Image (cartoon, helix red, strand yellow):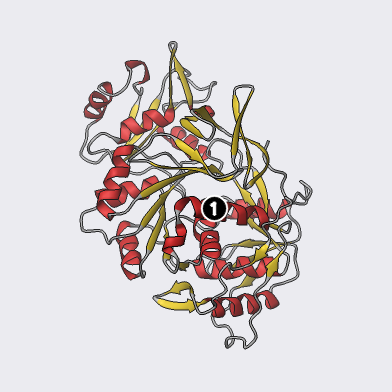
Amino acid sequence: MPNAAFGDRSGVGTASSDAGDKLLRSDNLDDVAGWQSQHAISRRRFLSDVAQIGDRLPAHKYVVNLCTDRYRFMVGFAAAMRREQITLLPANDMDRTLEALASDYHDVYALADTTNPPLPVFRYPEILGPQLETIDLPALPAEQPAVVLFTSGTTGTPKRVAKSWGVLVRSARSAGNRLGIAKFRGGTVIGTVPHQHSYGLESVILLAFEHGLAIGAERPFYPTDIQAALEAAPRPRILVTTPVHIRALVTEQGVRPEVDLILSATAPLSPELAAQAEKRFRAPLIEIYGSTETGQIATRRTVHETQWRCLDDVLLQQQDGRSVALGGAVPSPTLLEDMIEPTGHDTFLLAGRSAELVDIAGKHTTLSHLNQQLLSIDGVRDGIFVMPDTDARYVNRLASFVVAPGLRTETILAALRERIDPAFLPRPLLLVDVLPRDRLGKVPREALLQLMRQSRIF
């Protein structure tokens, strides 16, 4: 039951709420809104930039915000809201994706700073005018349509999910309250995740809007770049990242700069990896659970607990053996793709996605569990288990693709025999140089199928 999308073919959906508010929750306009090449940008300047960009945006209903610079994205997102334009955030910026988007949303243009998309483009100006003398702090109605997000397509065709400004605000406030963000006020958010994705939008952009934080304009990807961005950021520092980046950071040699809080999402972390990250960065690591459809709905401190605890006002209900989320920033009952085991009125265990269930010879497990066992082997840098489609040649056999320089297939299989039931051993196990992960560290289903076809085994 995903939310209805704001779009030409889907109609318009809104969520009534009392969460409509000023664009920025902080009234101190001298606070820092962002850091761009180690240059501080005040909230006053940010609002001036929003007004200037907003006045120049073309008169369309939809905008695809493709700005790679996070500060420019933030300005463009706010300027679109000010003009009552709806921001479309596709799962990727490939030409074919954008062309398909244009066929669904006819009154659309792209806001870009470096790319050349196959859409009408408004180029973010390299230089804006002097700071405006009169600063307008926009107040936005809670019911105003804000974004249409698109799922990553990891398990199939991407779905569109529309959200109002009020829903986004409630999500950011609820998460910030749970995370204790108030004590980090004035700090800097460094994100390794794309701001065009729901996780990056909520845990970087909106967390900063609603809790008096500054954002780092760069999106560092490699461990050395992440370290440099953290070292340049004033404390307190909040690192918003993914398990793939965490694994790379803890295995990279060298001393990591201290941070004050680490947030992780997109896939569950093992307690061992979470403990390594906390020791390396000398900071607590909190996992966020959610989805594009629901937004963030639960958290856990992984080194101390296996259970997830729902954010305030979020309820999970069981319907026909599946879990449905409702309340808080989830305005309508929304089916979860994951298998949930309730353990209390607001706590649960996560058993993996329903699409990841594996049943071989009467024995059951999940692909997530198998992947964690694979990644726990010394020398394995990356890896993934695959269950071919039901019409594939090996219907009842798992396979795996593994990045493990210096290791032999036999060595990895021997280690797996100590960790998993023999029924789930991959046949075959293929060594590859790299997995086709996207910007969130996920392997989209289509990319995985292409990898399988290239192997000429399936």
Rendered-image quadrant of the C terminus: top left
User: Which picture quadrant has residue 183?
Assistant: bottom left
In the figure, is residue 187 to the left or right of 280?
right
Which percent across, then down, holds residue 286? 40, 47
Which percent across, then down, holds residue 237? 37, 63
User: Which picture quadrant has residue 383?
Assistant: top left
Residue 167 in sight: yes
| Disc 1 secondary structure class | loop
In the figure, is residue 157 to the left or right of 257?
right
Question: Residue at left 42%, top 31%?
Answer: 368
Whether 244 is drawn above or below 29: the answer is above
Whether 457 is drawn above or below 142: the answer is above
Near mark 1 (Cα within 10 A), the count class, few <14, some 14-19 or many ≥20, is many
Question: Residue at left 69%, top 69%?
Answer: 139
- The residue identified by callout 1 is 197
In the figure, is residue 111 to the left or right of 404?
right
Which of these two is toward me, 171 or 423?
Answer: 171
Q: What amino acid type is highlighted by mark number 1? A: His
Residue 439 in sight: no
Question: Residue at left 50%, top 78%?
Answer: 42
Rendered-image quadrant of the N terminus: top right
Count how many numbered circles sit on residues in the image: 1
